Image (tube, rainbow, N blue to C red):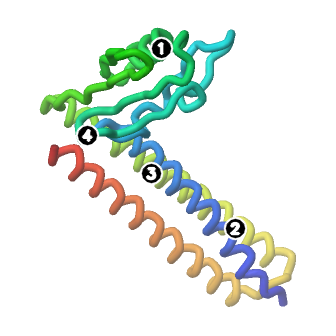
Amino acid sequence: MVSDLPSLKADITRRMDGALETLRREFAGLRTGRANPALLEPVRVEAYGSEVPLAQVGTVNVPEPRMLTVQVWDRSLVSAVERAIRDAGIGLNPASDGQLVRVPIPILTEQRRLELAKLAGKYAEGARVAVRGVRRDGMEQIKALEKKALIGEDEGKDWADAVQKLTDQYVKKIDDALAEKERDIKQV
């Protein structure tokens, strides 16, 4: 008999944590009407002959609830930063003030709120699919161990139950994160 459930469970937990963390990062990038530095994470700036993440050319701050600022380190890149934010497709219109780029966060329309809620739901479903994929891999590993006669049928069933419980916990965490994000979107 092999008592490898802890390492199997640790691997499954690590992979499900990854799916949940990815979902949280995606949610952070959704604009809820409140300023959040994560809104500018996808922005890439044309600088020094290549495209680099915004964080490599300046510091993003939140001076007030509906305003982001980017302190650009190199004065020659201010217009490139403005252009990158404007062209990123996130609905923001920056204005520069010397080396500081101000990015006001506009109030969301009801239609945009519905679009954001729908997009949040899509992200959550992607995370659920990822978690279920991890569960499927875990179940296949258990079946393979049973087939090789390394674990018994009863032990395999116990392991499968443990994997299913873990899956249910992560799906609930995903649903909770979605509900919280939807509240944020509707509340502002």
Mark 4, residue position = 64
Residue at screen point 31% across, 21% down? 91
For the residues labelled 1 and 4, the Cα–Cα distance comes to: 21 Å
Counting residues from the start of the chain, the first of labels 2 and 4 encountered is 2
Counting residues from the start of the chain, the first of labels 2 and 3 encountered is 2
Disc 2 is placed on an element classified as: helix
Disc 4 is placed on an element classified as: strand
Mark carried by residue 55: none
On the image, the x and y values in percent for residue 125 come to 42, 48
Quarter of the figure that contains the N terminus = bottom right
Disc 3 packing (10 Å; few <14; some 14–19; many ≥20): some
Mark carried by residue 24: 3
Does 152 appear above or below 184? Answer: below
Asked whether the beta carbons under mark 2 and mark 4 sit within 8 Å of each other, the answer is no
The part of the image, by quadrant, that contains residue 48 is top right
Residue at screen point 72% across, 81% down? 5
Mark carried by residue 11: 2
The part of the image, by quadrant, that contains residue 175 is bottom left
Does 140 appear above or below 83? Answer: below
Mark 1, residue position = 78
Disc 1 is placed on an element classified as: helix
Counting residues from the start of the chain, the first of labels 1 and 4 encountered is 4
Task: Give amino acid for label 3.
Answer: Arg
On the image, the x and y values in percent for residue 23 come to 46, 49
Asked whether the beta carbons under mark 1 and mark 4 sit within 8 Å of each other, the answer is no
Q: Nearer the viewer, residue 33 or 181?
A: 33
Asked whether the beta carbons under mark 1 and mark 2 sit within 8 Å of each other, the answer is no
Asked whether the beta carbons under mark 3 and mark 1 sit within 8 Å of each other, the answer is no
